[in-house]
Image (tube, rainbow, N blue to C red):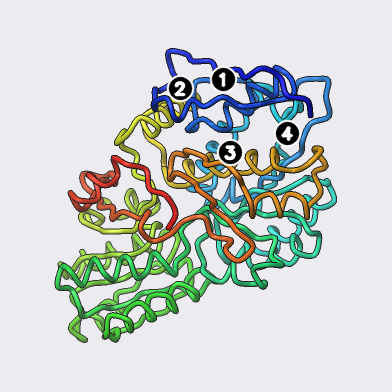
C-alpha cells in the first residue's frame, strides 16, 4: 500500500466534537479508504446515512448476522440487528472496506438451538468472512462448533452465558464476545445487593442453557460474599405460574429475588410477588431491562435492579449521537433493548478495525482471528473505549468496571446509583 497525504475526516452538523485527539488523520491507499478508515477511528459517528442496497462494482465483503429476529426473543434480536445495520450503512456510505461495501448475510435463528445450528451451517456455506450474532446462550452453544471447525470468527454481541468464550482454549478459539458475560454480571449485582443489606437471597433460574450457566455464576458470586441462597427455584421456559416457588422462598425468609431467565418468566416472577403482596426487590442480569419484563410486569417491575453496559441516556456526546442517529434511522425515541443495539453497533466497528489490520486484504478466517486479537488502534465506541479488546488469551471485550446498575423507574431503565451516572460521563476502558 502506497501512502498518500493525510486527510482529516469530514464533519457534519450531526458529528459530535470529541476533541482533537479523536480526530486524528488516517493513512490510506486512496480516497474512499481514507474516509472509511477515518470513520473507523472516530468515536462511532452516526451522521452518515445509506440505503441497505449494496452498490454495484467492487466485490462486497460478506459478513454473517444471526439472531432471533422473529419469535420470543425478537425483543432484543431486532435492536441488535438494527445496531449492526446502522454501523454497516455508515461504513458503506464512506467507502466500505478498501472500496468494497460490507454486505450482511442475515439468518434468523428464531431462538431455537436446532434452527441456529442449521443457519450457522448455511453461513459457512455462504462463505462469509466472519459472523456477528447470537442473543440466546443455548442457541449459541449449539452452534459454536460450526464456526470453530470452519475457522470462521464469530463475535457475540448479546448472549452472555459464561461458557461461550470458554468452550475452546483461548489461543485456539474463534469465538469472541462484546457483551458482558454473566461471570462478571452476577458478582456485580451481588455486591450491590449486599451493600443494600439484602443478604437472604432466593434464586429463580430457568432450565435453558442461559439459566443453567447463570445459576452457577450467581451461586459462585454469593459464595464469594459468604452467602448461601435460602431458596433455589428451577422452572421451564413458558411457565405461567410460580406461586408455589414464591411462597416457598418467602417462607425461607428471602428478602430479595435474583432471577436468571431471559423471557416473560421474569414478569411471571414479578406478578407473582405482587399477587402475594410480597414486597421484596427483584434483581438480576440484563434481561430485567427487556420489554418482556418491563411491559409484562407493569407496576410490579418498578424498582427492579439489573446490570447494564449501556443506559439510553445522552450521558456523553458519543451516546447522544448514537441515540439521535438510531431515532432518525428507525423512528421513535425508544429502543426496546438499548444494550443490544449499542453492543451490535460497536461490534461492527471492532470487526472493521480488525479487517484493516489484515495484510493485503486477504480475509481468511485465521487472518481475521489474528487481527481481532491484535487490534492496533483504540476504537472510541458507544459502550466503551476499546483498547486492545481481545487477545490470544482473552476473548471477552468487556470487564466488570464497565458495568453500571440500572433500575426500572416509571417504566424505563435509568441509573440506580448516582455514582454510576457520574462515572458514566466518561466512557470506560478495559482493565
* Label 1 environment density (alpha carbons within 10 Å; few <14, some 14–19, many ≥20): some
Answer yes or no: is residue 345 visible. yes
**Rendering coords of residue 5 (x, y %):** 66, 17
Q: Are marks 1 and 4 in contact (CB under 8 Å)?
A: no
Q: Which residue is mark 2?
A: 328
Indicate which disc, 1 or 3, sits on the residue closer to the N terminus.
Answer: 1
**Rendering coords of residue 227 (x, y %):** 27, 84
**Rendering coords of residue 146 (x, y %):** 76, 63
Indicate which disc, 3 or 2, sits on the residue closer to the N terminus.
Answer: 2
Relative to 21, say whether 207 is above or below: below
Q: Mark 3 or mark 2, which is nearer to you? A: 3
Indicate which disc, 4 or 3, sits on the residue closer to the N terminus.
Answer: 4
- Mark 1 falls on what kind of element? loop
**Rendering coords of residue 170 (x, y %):** 64, 68
* Label 2 environment density (alpha carbons within 10 Å; few <14, some 14–19, many ≥20): some
Answer yes or no: is residue 90 visible. no
Q: Are marks 3 and 2 in contact (CB under 8 Å)?
A: no
Report the front residue among 22 and 165: 22
Badge number at residue 103: 4
- Mark 3 falls on what kind of element? helix
| Quadrant of the drawing holding the C terminus | bottom left
Q: Are marks 4 and 2 in contact (CB under 8 Å)?
A: no
Q: Mark 2 or mark 1, which is nearer to you? A: 1
Badge number at residue 349: 3
Task: Calculate the distance from the C-alpha at mark 1 to the C-alpha at mark 3.
Answer: 16 Å
| Quadrant of the drawing holding the N terminus | top right
Task: Calculate the distance from the C-alpha at mark 1 to the C-alpha at mark 4.
Answer: 15 Å
Badge number at residue 49: 1
Q: Is residue 180 left or right of residue 97?
A: left
Count the marks: how many?
A: 4
Task: Calculate the distance from the C-alpha at mark 2 to the C-alpha at mark 1.
Answer: 10 Å
Q: Are marks 2 and 1 in contact (CB under 8 Å)?
A: yes
Amino acid at each position: 500500500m502506497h501512502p498518500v497525504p493525510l486527510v482529516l475526516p469530514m464533519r457534519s452538523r450531526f458529528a459530535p466534537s470529541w476533541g482533537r485527539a479523536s480526530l486524528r488523520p488516517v493513512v490510506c491507499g486512496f480516497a474512499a479508504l481514507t474516509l472509511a478508515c477515518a470513520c473507523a477511528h472516530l468515536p462511532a459517528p452516526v451522521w452518515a446515512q445509506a440505503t441497505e442496497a449494496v452498490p454495484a462494482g467492487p466485490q462486497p465483503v460478506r459478513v454473517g448476522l444471526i439472531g432471533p429476529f422473529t419469535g420470543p426473543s425478537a425483543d432484543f434480536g431486532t435492536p441488535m440487528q438494527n445496531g449492526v445495520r446502522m454501523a454497516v450503512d455508515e461504513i458503506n456510505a464512506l467507502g466500505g472496506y478498501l472500496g468494497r461495501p460490507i454486505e450482511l448475510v442475515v439468518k434468523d435463528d428464531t431462538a431455537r438451538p436446532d434452527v441456529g445450528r442449521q443457519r450457522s451451517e448455511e453461513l459457512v456455506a455462504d462463505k462469509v468472512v466472519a459472523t456477528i450474532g447470537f442473543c440466546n446462550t443455548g442457541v449459541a452453544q449449539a452452534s459454536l462448533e460450526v464456526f470453530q471447525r470452519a475457522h470462521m470468527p464469530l463475535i457475540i454481541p448479546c448472549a452472555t452465558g459464561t461458557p461461550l468464550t470458554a468452550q475452546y482454549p483461548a489461543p485456539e478459539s474463534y469465538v469472541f464476545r462484546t457483551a458482558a458475560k454473566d461471570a462478571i454480571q452476577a458478582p456485580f449485582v451481588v455486591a450491590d445487593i449486599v451493600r443494600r443489606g439484602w443478604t437472604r437471597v432466593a434464586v429463580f433460574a430457568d432450565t435453558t442453557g442461559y439459566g443453567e450457566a447463570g445459576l452457577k455464576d450467581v451461586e459462585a458470586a454469593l459464595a464469594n460474599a459468604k452467602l448461601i441462597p435460602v431458596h433455589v427455584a428451577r422452572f421451564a421456559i413458558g411457565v405461567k405460574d410460580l406461586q408455589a416457588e414464591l411462597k416457598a422462598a418467602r417462607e425461607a425468609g428471602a428478602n430479595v429475588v435474583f432471577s436468571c431467565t431471559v423471557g416473560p418468566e421474569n414478569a411471571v416472577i414479578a406478578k407473582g410477588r405482587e399477587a402475594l403482596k410480597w414486597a421484596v426487590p427483584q434483581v438480576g442480569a440484563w434481561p430485567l431491562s427487556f420489554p418482556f419484563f418491563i411491559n409484562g410486569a407493569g407496576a410490579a417491575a418498578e424498582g427492579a435492579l439489573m446490570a447494564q453496559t449501556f443506559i439510553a441516556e445522552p450521558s456523553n456526546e458519543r451516546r447522544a449521537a448514537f441515540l439521535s442517529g438510531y431515532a432518525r434511522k428507525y423512528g421513535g425515541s425508544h429502543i426496546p433493548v438499548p444494550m443490544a443495539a449499542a453492543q451490535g453497533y460497536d461490534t461492527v466497528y471492532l470487526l472493521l478495525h480488525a479487517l484493516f489490520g489484515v495484510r493485503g486484504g486477504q480475509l481468511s478466517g485465521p487472518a481475521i482471528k489474528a487481527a481481532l486479537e491484535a487490534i492496533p488502534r483504540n476504537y472510541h465506541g458507544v459502550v466503551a473505549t476499546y483498547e486492545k479488546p481481545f487477545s490470544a488469551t482473552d476473548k471477552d471485550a468487556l470487564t466488570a468496571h464497565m458495568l453500571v446498575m440500572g433500575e426500572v423507574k416509571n417504566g424505563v431503565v435509568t441509573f440506580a446509583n448516582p455514582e454510576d451516572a457520574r462515572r458514566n460521563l466518561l466512557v470506560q476502558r478495559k482493565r
